[in-house]
Image (cartoon, rainbow, N blue to C red):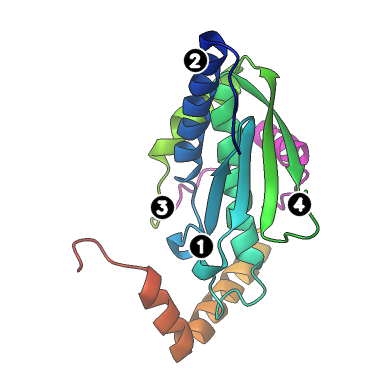
Amino acid sequence: MTLTFNDTAMQTQDATLHNRLYRAIESAASAPSGHNTQPWKFRLLHDGVELYADRSHALPVVDPQDRELTISCGVALFYLQLAMHCGGLATLVRVLPDFERPDLLARVLVSGPHRADEDELKLFAAMPMRSTNRQPFEPRPIHSSMHDSWYLDAKSQRCWIQLIDDVDKKHEVADLVSEGDRLQGSDRAFRRELARWIRPNHSS
């Protein structure tokens, strides 16, 4: 896209917006993804950002229909929108805006100024501290008021969340996870795909 500026002030304003959007993209690129494949691409627009699925980072064995790839891109979209909000930019999100381009998953346009609230600022500050926990969780129960908050948060993103408190059902889920790990671990193609993306610390 070729841009024409009528005066220096407009050029400076556009450059500032460009920098804010670029910083938001940098934050979005830190989102978690399956096997840390980061299966996304971003295109910087004059007034926003486009998010594309990067099929070259797909996982055909563990994710043959690209379902988890799309979920990973959805997390990157959330990171992008949050970073833009905390950068003072209100957003208008259009999901799957072009039927002819299925890899174009979303277009996020700047719709004006935005003042981030306390929750947004806390989430944004937590983004670079995100890490995978492979240790046991604490046994103490989570207060029911937190459950209500999670339900509302999920609903606001047009998602749903399933909370399991029953001990027997927890064991059923654990058994399913264990069986899934066993089946995947016995699949040579799965092990090869996993090794392609996952590297232990201090490994070449």
Residue at the spot 51% in from the left edge and 83% down from the top edge: 184
Residue at the spot 61% in from the left edge and 54% down from the top edge: 52
Q: Please tell me whether mark 3 sits on a helix, a strand or a loop.
A: loop
Query: Which residue was labeled with disc 1?
Result: 34
Distance from the alpha carbon under mark 1 to that under mark 2: 39 Å
Whether 138 is among the magenta residues is: yes
Which quarter of the figure has residue 172? bottom right
Q: Position of residue 189 (x, y in %)?
A: 47, 88
Q: Please tell me whether mark 1 sits on a helix, a strand or a loop.
A: helix
Query: Which residue was labeled with disc 4?
Result: 96
Question: Tag on residue 133?
Answer: 3
Q: Please tell me whether mark 2 sits on a helix, a strand or a loop.
A: helix
Which class describes the residues within 10 Å of circle 2: few (<14), some (14-19), or many (20+)? few
Query: Which residue was labeled with disc 2?
Result: 12
Residue 57 appearing in the image: yes
Q: Earlier in the sequence, mark 1 or mark 2?
A: 2
Q: Earlier in the sequence, mark 1 or mark 3?
A: 1
